[in-house]
């Protein structure tokens, strides 16, 4: 497996050390504290005590499983949509971008310069009941006469899709750009149609990018709360909103902590299953 | 005579027209996708020229260049943007380096704990920012480490590492090792091979990862808020300002950064053209 | 009798700010007088003012001179007292800010601030005071204390105003986009919650104190004394309106965009926002509901470890009507300082007539302050959070 035989023993650890050390101190340690908090009981008014309160987890799941499921559905939909939008885009930049590739990549992350809030407010404006989008949809009878997009799950999913698009597009680009165009040519020389060349050559070779992109989109999207808050009604609230409210408004740290761990564990299990389904070592490296 | 020449049959007219359409469909699609992506930005840019009488910048009232002339009229806004850019630059470079090293280790070497690390790297991404930010703050308080510029930086590097690892891995997994083998066969040692063969070939992956972490850093709100001490970054300022009406100068500054960044890239492209490199 | 605040009465910010900026500082110095020395000597000992005052406030919540990019009143304070103000705009949400400062405070550490500003529709001013995380004001340094509006003298979280002084206030009422209601403003909570013609085009505030206050008043209950029965009545009424689809969303001040665009017909809203929105859209009007509205305050508190004397001196400075007028002219929320209206009238009569910034007694009599005990009732808070989606 290793290419650099001589240093097989030590090299990987040397490479890992700086990054993992950083994460150990600044992520694992806080996470440990969070775990400690998740097993506390009590309240802000009367104080918290560490009591091995596994009940917090049980309560978290039983009370908020609906929010959890909803979050995964929204994040899942958003990921699929983001994939559908980003794949052709990434393909185009990778194969037709030429000199302009880096410029186009920059354009993809440009929305991040105006802050999450402003982007979402801009969508609130675009999806306004009296705006072009809604009017067009009404004309096409995709929306009822009195239909609206704002304060619906559609708006929330659309918002999440938009905000996480670069997370999908960039990894896809990274994998697609690596594909040697001559491989595709070769396939066509061997009488494959364009579609066949794509399905048999390009797509499989781009799978690592698909894998990376879907994860980079789905995982943070599942914990999102802003889109549900601004573009949705109470019925659209996600687990992120719950954790937010537990932590800030109710100052219920054990509940917030246990909910967070439930979310993280569920995501991790999902990732493992996903990796198994999609492929194996070749895919994940 | 040409019995052995493997010439494919000439595509029919239908196939060629279909080919033409398909060629352009992709371009049209890409343009549409870009429009979708940049639509809110277009609105932000447009409204930087708006002239509202009140403080909210939601409805178009009239065109004015005043906001651009007085681009620094709002105290604290420009400082906030400068701070955000500084932190983003430093943290994305640091995270890219650390993350790329991890990615190299994960893809190329077998070692104990490899699978675990592979999956644990997803943890920082999956933890909700609010609890992560608050827990990190607790860590800093316990260590009696004053919050401010450095703590924001530390936090940003922390959450960016995972994104870099995953992005660079997507490139490394498909990397053709035979190129490295060929270089070594031709006498290059490991370091030279890495420098002259590997690195240039995975460079687009590293660049994309750096861009992604830059974007994440410049846009981060929740974790930054808890660990910022008295510093105010651009997102922090904007979220606060939105309560009483974000002034059009917010749009102006955002547009400026966008334009400057694109401009720099454009210059880069044109310079490359001069050099004749592709 | 409902009063609508029409565009005629609402002011263009630009005009007001421009006029106030032109005011020479010497005029104000003559007005203000030298309180600081007086405050120092009356106690018998000369208390020292600190070299810097560290003041954390909400973003864009103090006067700004766009040409010099300074805050004129802060500079004035420095000129008068020699104390420099380090001004931080790092508060944008009560709960988030509290989440940030509560750990050091709970461990007895100072947060390096002399003044922070927290809203009394959140539980946090109560918490700070009850847990002894706030320093007492040095009232001997605040002779201008008497300028505090009577209506705000005795809030339930600080009955003697020993720990806090209001910075700015605001009122909660109903904003209407009259284009969608046939020209007539929505003036009652009953209409807001029950009128089918408004279905799906109404929002309520996500702030429990605001929403519950207004609905309790509509039910005939008293929001200054909340009990389980009255809370439940209000809660259930809101729930009904949400479940039926009457209420579209719970919002912070993000109702502003949809309201001005006509996505919403009416919104439970804050007075200060509508001052701004109506300057661009004459169809937007604001009312205190007929059954009554709410008044809330952003309060200056001195966190533990802050310099009480210097902070109190600053508060005194801000309660000088002339200074208060300058701040109100920019911020456009309700000023808590008596006499500021008259000072503002000397500079800009139109500003002084704005009943959303200087409400008359009739309006003030119809707004109530929410019972702060209800804000620390975990049961109520949990029910409310469940109602708004989480």
Image: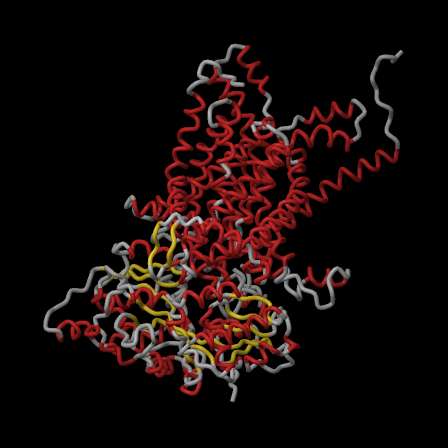
For the point 53% across and 64% down, which residue is it? C388
Task: Check the image and report above or below for C12 versus B87.
Answer: below
Quadrant (top left, top right, bottom left, bottom right) of the C terminus of chain B: top right
Task: Check the image and report above or below for C221 versus B245.
Answer: below
Quarter holding residue B50? bottom right
| Residue sitting at the far bottom | C1
Q: Is residue C103 left or right of residue C174?
A: left
Q: Position of residue B92 (x, y in %)?
A: 45, 39
Q: Position of residue B191 (x, y in %)?
A: 46, 18
Quarter holding residue C283? bottom right
Identify the image's colour scheme: rainbow, by chain, secondary structure or one colour: secondary structure
For the point 56% across and 15% down, which residue is it? B181
For the point 40% across and 29% down, which residue is it? A17
User: Between C194 and C187, which is closer to the camera in this rendering?
Assistant: C194
Is residue A39 something one can see in this rendering? yes
Q: Position of residue B180 (x, y in %)?
A: 55, 17
User: Between A61 and A30, which is closer to the camera in this rendering?
Assistant: A61
Q: Position of residue C41 (x, y in %)?
A: 12, 73
Is residue A176 something one can see in this rendering? no
For the point 62% across and 81% down, which residue is it? C183
| Residue sitting at the far left | C44
Quadrant (top left, top right, bottom left, bottom right) of the N terminus of chain B: top right
Total labels: the figure holds 0
User: Between C271 and C122, which is closer to the camera in this rendering?
Assistant: C122
Task: Check the image and report above or below for B79 versus C190.
Answer: above
Q: Is residue C41 left or right of residue C132?
A: left
User: Between C104 and C66, which is closer to the camera in this rendering?
Assistant: C104
């Amino acid at each position: 497996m290793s290419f650099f035989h001589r240093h097989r023993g030590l090299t990987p650890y040397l490479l890992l050390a700086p990054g993992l050390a950083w994460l150990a101190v600044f992520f694992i340690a806080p996470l440990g504290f969070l775990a400690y908090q998740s097993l506390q009981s009590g309240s802000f008014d009367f104080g918290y005590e560490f009591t091995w309160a596994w009940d917090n987890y049980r309560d978290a799941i039983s009370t908020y499983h609906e929010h959890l499921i909803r979050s995964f559905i929204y994040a899942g939909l958003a990921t699929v949509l983001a994939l559908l939008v980003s794949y052709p885009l990434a393909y185009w930049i990778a194969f037709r971008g030429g000199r302009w590739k880096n410029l186009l990549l920059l354009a993809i992350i440009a929305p991040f310069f105006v802050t999450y809030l402003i982007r979402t407010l801009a969508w609130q404006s675009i999806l306004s009941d009296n705006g072009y989008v809604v009017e067009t949809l009404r004309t096409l009878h995709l929306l009822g006469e009195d239909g609206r997009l704002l304060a619906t799950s559609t708006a929330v999913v659309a918002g999440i899709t938009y905000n996480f698009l670069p997370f999908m597009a960039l990894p896809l680009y990274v994998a697609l750009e690596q594909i040697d165009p001559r491989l595709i040519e070769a396939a066509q020389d061997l009488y494959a149609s364009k579609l066949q060349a794509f399905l048999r050559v390009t797509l499989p070779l781009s799978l690592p990018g698909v894998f990376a992109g879907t994860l980079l989109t789905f995982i943070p999207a599942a914990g999102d709360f802003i889109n549900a808050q601004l573009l949705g009604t109470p019925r659209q609230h996600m687990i992120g909103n719950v954790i937010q409210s537990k932590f800030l408004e109710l100052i219920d740290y054990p509940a917030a902590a246990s909910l967070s761990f439930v979310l993280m564990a569920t995501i991790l299990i999902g990732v493992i299953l996903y990796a198994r389904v999609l492929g194996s070592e070749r895919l994940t490296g | 005579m040409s019995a052995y020449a493997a010439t494919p049959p000439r595509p029919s007219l239908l196939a060629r027209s279909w080919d033409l359409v398909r060629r352009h469909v992709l371009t049209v699609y890409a343009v549409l996708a870009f429009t979708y992506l940049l639509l809110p930005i277009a609105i932000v840019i447009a409204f930087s020229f708006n002239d509202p009488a009140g403080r909210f910048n939601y409805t178009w009232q009239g065109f004015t260049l005043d906001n651009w002339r007085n681009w620094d009229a709002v105290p604290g806004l420009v400082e906030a943007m400068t701070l955000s850019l500084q932190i983003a630059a430093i943290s994305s470079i640091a995270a890219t380096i650390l993350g790329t090293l991890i990615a190299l280790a994960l893809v190329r070497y077998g070692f104990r704990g490899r699978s675990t690390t592979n999956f644990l790297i997803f943890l920082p991404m999956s933890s909700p920012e609010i609890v992560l930010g608050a827990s990190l703050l607790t860590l800093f308080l316990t260590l009696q480490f004053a919050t401010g510029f450095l703590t924001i930086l530390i936090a940003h590097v922390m959450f960016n590492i995972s994104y870099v690892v995953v992005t660079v891995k997507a490139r490394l997994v498909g990397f053709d090792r035979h190129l490295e083998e060929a270089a070594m066969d031709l006498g290059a040692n490991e370091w030279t091979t890495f420098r002259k063969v590997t690195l240039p070939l995975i460079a687009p992956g590293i660049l994309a990862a750096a861009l992604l972490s830059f974007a994440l850093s410049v846009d981060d709100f929740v974790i930054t808020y808890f660990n910022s001490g008295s510093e105010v970054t651009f997102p922090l300022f904007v979220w606060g300002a939105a309560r009483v009406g974000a002034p059009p100068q917010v749009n102006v500054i955002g547009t400026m950064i966008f334009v400057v960044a694109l401009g720099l890239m454009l210059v880069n492209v044109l310079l490359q053209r001069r050099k004749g490199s592709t | 009798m409902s009063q609508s605040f029409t565009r005629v009465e609402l002011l263009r910010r630009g005009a007001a700010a421009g006029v106030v900026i032109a005011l020479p500082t010497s005029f104000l110095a003559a007005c203000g007088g030298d309180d600081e020395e007086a405050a120092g000597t009356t106690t018998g000992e000369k208390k020292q003012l600190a070299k810097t005052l560290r003041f954390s406030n909400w973003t864009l919540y103090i006067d700004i001179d766009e040409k010099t990019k300074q805050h004129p009143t802060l500079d004035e304070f420095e000129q008068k007292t020699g104390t420099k103000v380090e001004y931080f705009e790092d508060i944008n949400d009560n709960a988030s800010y509290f989440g940030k400062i509560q750990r050091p405070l709970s461990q007895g550490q100072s947060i390096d601030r002399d003044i922070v500003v927290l809203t009394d529709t959140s539980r946090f001013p109560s918490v700070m005071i009850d847990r002894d995380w706030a320093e007492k004001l040095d009232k001997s340094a605040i002779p201008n204390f008497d300028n505090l509006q009577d209506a705000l003298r005795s809030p339930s979280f600080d009955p003697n105003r020993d720990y806090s002084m209001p910075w700015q206030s605001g009122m909660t009422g109903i904003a209407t986009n009259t284009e969608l209601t046939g020209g007539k403003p929505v003036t009652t909570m009953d209409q807001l919650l029950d009128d089918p013609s408004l279905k799906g085009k109404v929002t309520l505030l996500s702030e429990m104190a605001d929403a519950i206050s207004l609905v309790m008043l509509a039910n005939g209950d008293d929001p200054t004394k909340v009990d389980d029965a009255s809370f439940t009545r209000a809660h259930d009424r809101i729930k009904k309106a949400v479940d039926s689809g009457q209420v579209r969303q719970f919002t912070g001040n993000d109702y502003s965009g949809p309201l001005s665009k006509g996505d919403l017909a009416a919104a439970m809203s804050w007075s200060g926002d509508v001052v701004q929105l109506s300057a661009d859209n004459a169809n937007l009007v604001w009312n205190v509901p007929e059954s009554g509205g709410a008044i809330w305050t952003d309060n200056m508190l001195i966190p533990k470890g802050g310099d009480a004397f210097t902070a109190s001196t600053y508060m005194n400075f801000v309660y000088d009507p002339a200074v208060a007028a300058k701040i109100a002219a920019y911020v456009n929320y309700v000023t808590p300082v008596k006499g500021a209206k008259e000072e503002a009238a000397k500079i800009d009569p139109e500003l002084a007539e704005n009943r959303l910034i200087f409400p008359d007694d009739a309006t003030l009599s119809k707004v109530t302050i929410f019972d702060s005990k209800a804000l620390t009732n975990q049961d109520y808070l949990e029910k409310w959070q469940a109602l708004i989606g989480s």
